[in-house]
Image (tube, rainbow, N blue to C red):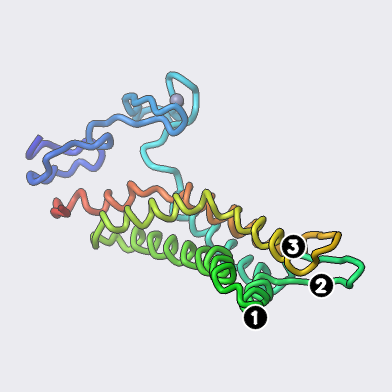
Amino acid sequence: MSDSIDQNTGEPQAATTRYTTASRANVVGCHACGLVQPLARTIEKQRCTRCGTAVHRRHPDSIARTWALLISAAILYIPANLFPIMHTSSILGSEDDTIMSGVALFWNDGDYPLSAVIFIASILVPMLKLISLCFLTISVQRRSTWRPRQRTTLFRIVEGVGRWSMLDVFVITLTIALVRFKSLAVITPGPGALAFASVVVLTMIASMQFDPRLMWDNIEPSGKKYD
Ligand SMILES: [Zn+2]
């Protein structure tokens, strides 16, 4: 493969690489069914020959879409923490709880592990996910060749954690209700719950829109070794 011409960029391929990529081999994988097929460069909107889904070499407008979703999530992160996540009313009275007041409630009661779990799951993890995705998107925009493997690992962690994000919405609402009112109580979600759920969903979609292959596209032409 050494010294051959890249069919997409028209540049000579790096002689140091010991593998080929789908992009270089001029094939593309279907996002839905995974079928690998030749990339038709003449057709504007190529569709998968097996399932009919639109196929792309890379996610279209990956960076712009990721940014739009990340900025929306970052804005909603503020009301998610400021507004009450739940409203509880019982014969003993009614109470509004934000995520932080829930954390403080358990901390003051001496339930340090539970308090820590809610703090990590509801405040720390969503914030770290937002920061990580921003960092990855900026690194692609700046055509960074810095530690692609570690960045790929970071992306996998963000994607993996995303599946469990909704869990703490239930944990926080159920536990606060159980601890605070040991009698029958009517619990209704506050505006913070909707904002928090939106943050989780938007971050999840942002990580889906981010195309990790873009990180490697910046490495390929340089022929830089990364292992
Ligand atoms: Zn397909």
Q: Position of residue 172 (x, y in %)?
A: 66, 62
Closer to the N terminus: mark 2 or mark 1? Answer: 2
Amino acid under disc 2: Glu
Q: Quadrant of residue 40?
A: top left
Amino acid under disc 3: Leu
Left or right of residue 118, residue 14 in this image: left
Tag nearer the camera, 2 or 1: 1
Q: Quadrant of the N terminus?
A: top left
How far is mark 2 from mark 1, CA to CA?
A: 17 Å
Image vertical order of residue 41 relative to residue 105, above or below:
above
Residue on which the image places disc 3? 178
Image vertical order of residue 68 relative to residue 49, above or below:
below
Secondary element at image label 1: helix
Amino acid under disc 1: Asn
The furthest residue to the bottom: 108
Q: Residue at x 34, y 24 (%)?
A: 37
